[in-house]
Image: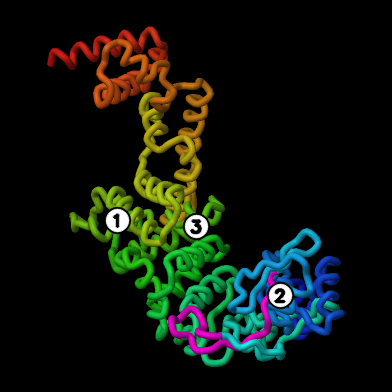
Amino acid sequence: MTTLRDGPCVDANSRARYCQAMARFPLTKTIKRFGARFKDAGYSLYVVGGAVRDHLLRLPIEDYDFATDAKPEEVMRLFRRVIPTGIEHGTVSVHFEGEFFEVTTFRTDGKYLDSRHPSSVNFVTDLIEDLRRRDFTINAFAADCIDGTVIDHNGGIADLKGRIIRAIGDANTRFDEDGLRILRAARIAAKLDFTIEENTFKAMQQKRENLIPVSAERIREELFKLLDSNHPRKGLEYLYKSGVLALILPELVEGEGVEQGGMHHEDVLTHALSTCEASIHFTKKVEVRFAALLHDVGKSRTARPGDGRTTFIGHEKEGQRIAHSIMRRLKASNEQTTLVEELVAHHMFHYESSWTDSAVRRFVRRVGVNRLDDLFALRLADQAAIHGRIDTTLLDELKARIAAILNEGDALSIADLAVNGNDLMALGIPKGKMVGQTLSYLMETVLDDPAQNTAQQLLAIARNYFSLIKTS
């Protein structure tokens, strides 16, 4: 990732020349034709916000937002296909030359009564007024859609050079307007490896309770974007120091001051942050990074003092329960919830070369083939956080043994058995609980000896098993 500081020019004068050279936004031919449609009708159109910022930082541009002095109804007259996606706030989506462009009319906002949405908006024709209502200086750029000229009326370029996140105007007011901006500040710090300016950070502390009315979905979205960055620890530490982490993930903060001893040199909370930071080297999945953050979340509730060190017996199961609760509170999907809680539940596996093949098969069945790579990524992150290095010798051996088992096609789930419930009922085994119990017994048999997985052999075993159950 290249930034103004990290680029080819490192002295102040060179950085200034670099900013000046980058002060024209690259416009596609489609955007130029889109902007020309506005200009021909007597209006102006600008690319605004993060797209311009990311261009100045030479980062990939993820999406485009547009602002105009044309009112929504005037935009709708200019184009045939327009969707009024947020027309009450001046936003419409325009379908133009096979692409969708989200366009918002310049506006000022009325009072924010819910720390999230303005009670009213006032459409204006002044771009500067519109930029002044935005959150941070580095998000308040505009680029003319005719010639690409970058406009900065809030000191954004200076803050880019200083690698600073600064609220526009009074930070307390900005966070009173929208509590989610508090999380957004930490998320941008994590994405760009920037520092949050002192007054802006103080306002994050003072206004953190403005996050209380914000929906769980929006909080999860910002939190997961933070974890998806290249510097998640930086953002998480801002959340911790501002008191926000205790507000949105109180179970995690319970690990503060819980010392572990032994090979651990950090308390439970600090180790969680270190593991999350290390996870970026082993996985791109945000759910795995979140599991890395939560993997020891059960330790604070299972801690018991011992001889020279604290023990945390069963912390992985308690952690699974807590992780499930957190994911439900954040309204994550069922798939995301299951992955995170299962990784937390299984992160304490302790492989040794002495494991039998049946033990390896049981491990694969317990974890699930589709979760193995994620669990191994979590293990490596945990190891790196503890030791500052990784040793993959045993893990590589386990992977090789698992690959051999998968290559052999050994049965690892009930669906892999050579018989099913209908076959068992045909033997006279009653439908329901007894069929399920018998299938589980057959599964255990096959895990011990894969050669038993033939229809003839399993039916004979099932018949004998049922006879024993009936007479016991």
Q: CA distance from mark 3 to mark 1?
A: 20 Å
Q: Report the amino acid beneath label 2.
A: Phe
Residue at 71% x, 67% y: name it.
Answer: 82
Q: Are marks 2 and 3 in contact (CB under 8 Å)?
A: no
Q: CA distance from mark 2 to mark 3?
A: 37 Å
Q: Is 472 included in the stretch rendered in magenta?
A: no
What element does badge 2 sit on?
strand
**What span is colored magenta in the figure?**
102-120
Percent position of residue 8, x then y: 76, 72
Q: Report the amino acid beneath label 1.
A: Gly
Q: Is 118 included in the stretch rendered in magenta?
A: yes
Left or right of 56 in this view: 466: left
Q: Is residue 265 above or below residue 57?
A: above
Which residue is the site of mark 3?
Answer: 278
Residue at 62% x, 84% y: name it.
Answer: 137
Q: Is residue 252 above or below residue 14?
A: above
Percent position of residue 205, x then y: 41, 83
* Front disc: 2 or 3: 2
Tell which circle, 2 or 3, labels the residue nearer the N-terminal end.
2
Q: CA distance from mark 2 to mark 1?
A: 46 Å
Quick check: can you spot residue 388? no
Q: Report the amino acid beneath label 3.
A: Ala
- Label 2 crowding class (10 Å Cα cut-off): few <14, some 14-19, many 20+? many
Residue at 54% x, 60% y: name it.
Answer: 228
User: Which mark, by number, is residue 66?
Assistant: 2
Say which of 212 and 432 sits in front.
Answer: 432
Quick check: can you spot residue 447? yes
Which residue is the site of mark 1?
Answer: 298
- Label 1 crowding class (10 Å Cα cut-off): few <14, some 14-19, many 20+? many
